[in-house]
Amino acid sequence: MATRKLLLLPGDGIGPEAMAEVEKLVAVMNDVTGSGFVTETALVGGAAYDAEGAPVSDATMDLALAADAVLFGAVGGPKWDGVAYEKRPEAGLLRLRKDMQLFANLRPAICYPALADASSLKREIIEGLDLLIVRELTGGVYFGEPKEIIDLGNGQKRAIDTQVYDTYEIERIARAAFELARTRRGKVTSMEKRNVMKSGLYWNEVVTRIHRDEYADLTLEHMLADSGGMQLVRAPKQFDVIVTDNLFGDMLSDIAAMLTGSLGMLPSASLGAADEVTGRRKALYEPVHGSAPDIAGKGIANPLAMIASFAMALRYSFAMIAEADALDASIAEVLESGGRTADIMAEGCRRIGTSEMGDAVAERFRARFSS
Ligand code: NAD
């Protein structure tokens, strides 16, 4: 049996509660599919700062680099508000992303039919939505130099950020998007601002070349990022995979996420380069939500974003497509059956807690593989 190494980093607040539900699923999966997952658990964020003096220790970093996939809960909370900047809980996540060289951030926006009425858009616009935003995560204006505020000496200051992309950065994110599109409906929409930005012009040129030379069997379209924002709320079902830079991706993925309702439902993945020998990518999977200190410890957090993040790990790190599909379908079935945590509660539904939600998904998953 193949061994698959998962590093679990539950973190703070509701992170451990949500991660406990993934652990249940891992056990069920090993039991019914013989998937051979082996898990290790380590501290991250405020919990790691308290116990180990750093938001992610070197030893944990080594575990992350050696794992086939890392599952990350959430970090932070008021307890650590006064901690030095470089030791704050979020610094643990930033170090993981940096040291694992995770340059591609994947944020799916899926509308479960049972939750279509929770969207701010009309049911017919949103029902059946299934798109994936691929955001460049390690370059662009968030990291470009110079990045500073300078005193001009005449009573004025000047604030500078630098939008910068090298060829290889655009090539690798474009390839990641095309590879993902190949496993989906085969369409990539690249978004930039080539009408006003040199970096947009060059982004467009490189994505076009990669498509022509390597992925001509897939469909590529280009859209200005501002127009893309409008289209996302006007007719989101036209999209399959959207590839865009760090800044536009930050905004567009939040817009897309909110099309489908609660923060407690949103998974994400961050991928690194494929290993030249094994083809395997370093990868970290995490819910979009934070540590939710306001509800931590109450057993009411929605674990579905964390569970759907695990489904993404099955799909993108382990190519376990049947299991990933079954897990996503199990989530949809539980929602369909009316089981709801407080954040997605609706009239006529049954309110359940974190653990009950995890149990319900695990049961449905087991039933799919036992029948
Ligand atoms: P948050 O996502 O933690 O919470 C926002 C609101 O959504 C809260 O009312 C919360 O109760 C609710 N919510 C979030 N996840 C939920 C879930 N799974 N089920 C039910 N309700 C849920 O964002 P925040 O309040 O701005 O931040 C709280 C802490 O989390 C801060 O310390 C922040 O820095 C940190 N944070 C961490 C991450 C991360 O670890 N990746 C991301 C965002 C925020």
Image (cartoon, rainbow, N blue to C red):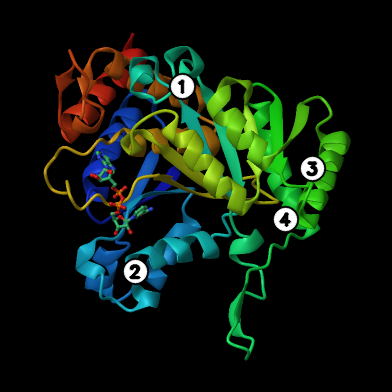
Name the one closer to the observer, 318 or 44: 44
Tell me the element at label 4: helix
Mark 3 lies within 8 Å of ligand 1 (Cβ measured): no
Q: Is residue 117 visible?
A: yes
Name the one closer to the observer, 158 or 25: 158
Image quarter hosting the N terminus: top left
Q: Circle 3 sits on which residue? A: 207
Tell whether label 2 touches label 3 (CB within 8 Å): no
What label does residue 165 carry, if any?
none
Vertical relation: 293 (above or below) 176: below
Earlier residue among tags 2 and 4: 2
Q: Circle 1 sits on which residue? A: 325
Tell me the element at label 2: loop
Give the amino acid at mark 4.
Glu
Q: Circle 4 sits on which residue? A: 169
Please state the horizontal and vertical placement of residue 216, each as a whole percent of the image. 84, 29
Q: Circle 2 sits on which residue? A: 55
